Image (cartoon, rainbow, N blue to C red):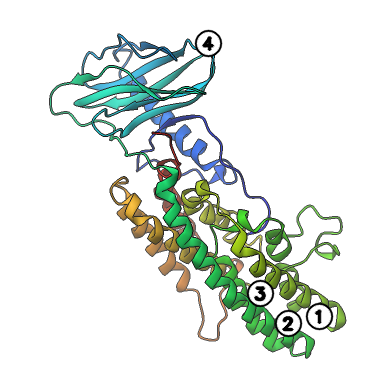
Amino acid sequence: MGPGRFRPGRGLLILAMPGLPFDSSLVGSDVRRAALTAVLALTAGVLAACGGSATPANLVSVSNGGCGVGWHLAGPGWHTFQIYNGAAEGGEVDLIDPANGAVYAEVNGLGPGTTSPMSLDVGSGSYAFRCLFDDYDPMTGPTVVVGGHTRGTPAILPITSNDLLAPASEYHAYVATGLNTLVSQADAVAADVRAGNLSAARSAWLPAHLTYERLGAAYDSFGNFDDEIDGRPDGLVGGVNSPQWTGFYRLEYGLWHGQGGPGLTSVADTLDHDIRALRTSWPSAEINLLDIGLRTHEILENALEFQLTGHDDYGSGSTLATTEANVQGTFELLTILHPLLAERYAGLPAVYTWLDRLQSLLNQNSRPNGRWIPVSGLSESSREQIDAACSQALQELAPIAAITEPRLT
């Protein structure tokens, strides 16, 4: 995956709705901010289409002494609340179902004396504001009941850090198994390079690289090892000729550009050493709980940016194979998270539908000899279909990052 990954941020959250178009120009930005901006844009469009007839915004005042006392709803439909923080502390405000704490919408990072909008499609049911201010216990305000049988924005049961401990532990074990396999594969590649058998080394290189690429949720936990093992020459002085460039891509470049001898042996041995050092350090590494859900989207986002464009092809023509490995890594995360997602994300079946389609399209370009058609060799139609399937899969995956973000309850 290499450098260039982003870090999650926080901001206004309206639980993402399936069916919004994915904008590939947002690759490299914060997935949650991008998805939520799209939701807000759709909300604004719906409200504007009402020709100014929408229900006027309700001012909801919150503080550490009271959470939304005195607010009301005229009835179901699109509503925009203006959430005003009258406290001296910053905080988070959720609109919840008071029966089970499920969250309809949320405003994060609401500073003292500031106002932030919260827009959603209010359906029939019970609603209450919950306030979480720094250094204060959570507070829940009065319940407001909206009658009738109208559907609105669904509430999603919050996920806590405790809920993610078991998935993180399971994924940690998955990575440990993968690293054991990777060490054996890297040993074989290095041995072939040392022996001067570069044809065998080229054949062994791809399976090793794909094993690493399937470990998609752990990269941040790898620390500097990720740059050393899977870094790109982007930004290095000298580019592909930089002595600081190491790892799988550096070895690929050498193997497919006629390099050999002591120089390439040093590259292969360094890669083998770094992978062994990573395996040694892994038992004490911790996986950021926030990454578990975020990576379900981010793995393929990076594949769309770097693999499906051919950016990360340094001679082997195997970026479609790498993308397919990324799909497998995404499936692994979804399997681990499935018990949490099944009851919270109605769009989960569409995630599997589009990942299956993407995987099928990718596999049509593999060859029996272990070679793959490079991106540059795809027909225009094939490339468009692959890009479209990946983009739609990303759209369906986008809400998972918000759903699985650990919350206070």
Asked whether disc 1 touches disc 4, contact meaning CB atoms under 8 Å apart, the reply is no
Q: Indicate which disc, 3 or 1, sits on the residue closer to the N terminus.
A: 1
Asked whether disc 4 touches disc 3, contact meaning CB atoms under 8 Å apart, the reply is no
Asked whether disc 3 touches disc 1, contact meaning CB atoms under 8 Å apart, the reply is no
SS under mark 3: loop
345 left or right of 279? left
Q: Which mark is residue 178?
A: none
Asked whether disc 1 touches disc 2, contact meaning CB atoms under 8 Å apart, the reply is yes
Q: CA distance from mark 2 to mark 3?
A: 17 Å
**Kind of residue sitting beneath label 2:** Ala
Q: Which mark is residue 190?
A: 2
| Residue that numbered label 1 is attached to | 265
Q: CA distance from mark 3 to mark 1?
A: 18 Å
Q: Indicate which disc, 2 or 3, sits on the residue closer to the N terminus.
A: 2
Q: Position of residue 170 (x, y in %)?
A: 45, 62
| Residue that numbered label 3 is attached to | 316
Q: Residues within 10 Å of mark 2 (few under 14, many from 20)?
A: many
Asked whether disc 4 touches disc 2, contact meaning CB atoms under 8 Å apart, the reply is no
